[in-house]
Amino acid sequence: MTKATVAAIVTPDDGGLDTILLTKRSIPPFQGHWCLPGGHIDDYETAEEAVVREVLEETGLLFTEPTFLYYFNELFAEYHFHAVALAFYGTGKGTMQLMEEEVAEIAWFSLQEALTLPLAFNHHQIIQRYASHIPH
């Protein structure tokens, strides 16, 4: 069955919309690839609750004012993975903490730099959609 997941485009709390937070995956699938913080929506959890929880669990940051961006189909037969990812953008507040269970590294990147990295899932598409959405 198709899963519902969330992905967060986290920007710094200084208002820089062209800087985003990425995490490097320490678990399969896409182990070693950079990605947006996110994950599966738990039973009886809203998408907004899930994206706030996932950002906190993976980065230690509070994801404030999550705003829905778009949905993305994620079909990866080679990983037996089929999900619909709901992408949100918002601000990360607090102090970053590496959560080593799933994340090997956390770092801020410009949008342009992020799009040159090996990204997991359909995160290139998500970041491109976000880049076309924000004012330049």
Image: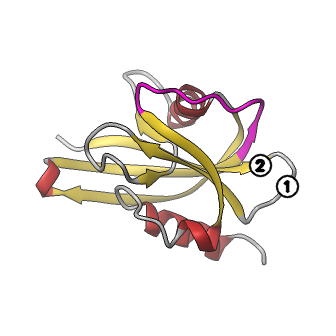
Q: How is the image coloured?
A: secondary structure
Residue under label 1: 15
Tag 1, which secondary structure? Answer: loop
Q: Position of residue 33 (x, y in %)?
A: 38, 53
Q: Is residue 101 highlighted in magenta?
A: yes
Question: Dot 2, how many residues are within 10 Å of its Cα: few (below 14), some (14-19), or many (20+)?
Answer: some
Residues tagged 2 and 1 counted as in contact (Cβ below 8 A): yes
Residue under label 2: 12
- The residue under label 2 is which amino acid type? Pro
Distance (Cα) linking label 2 and label 1: 6 Å
Q: Is residue 38 left or right of residue 33?
A: right
Q: Position of residue 3 (x, y in %)?
A: 28, 40
Q: Is residue 122 above or below residue 128?
A: above
- Prevailing SS of the magenta stretch: loop
Q: Quadrant of residue 127?
A: bottom right
Q: Is residue 93 highlighted in magenta?
A: yes
Magenta residue span: 91-102
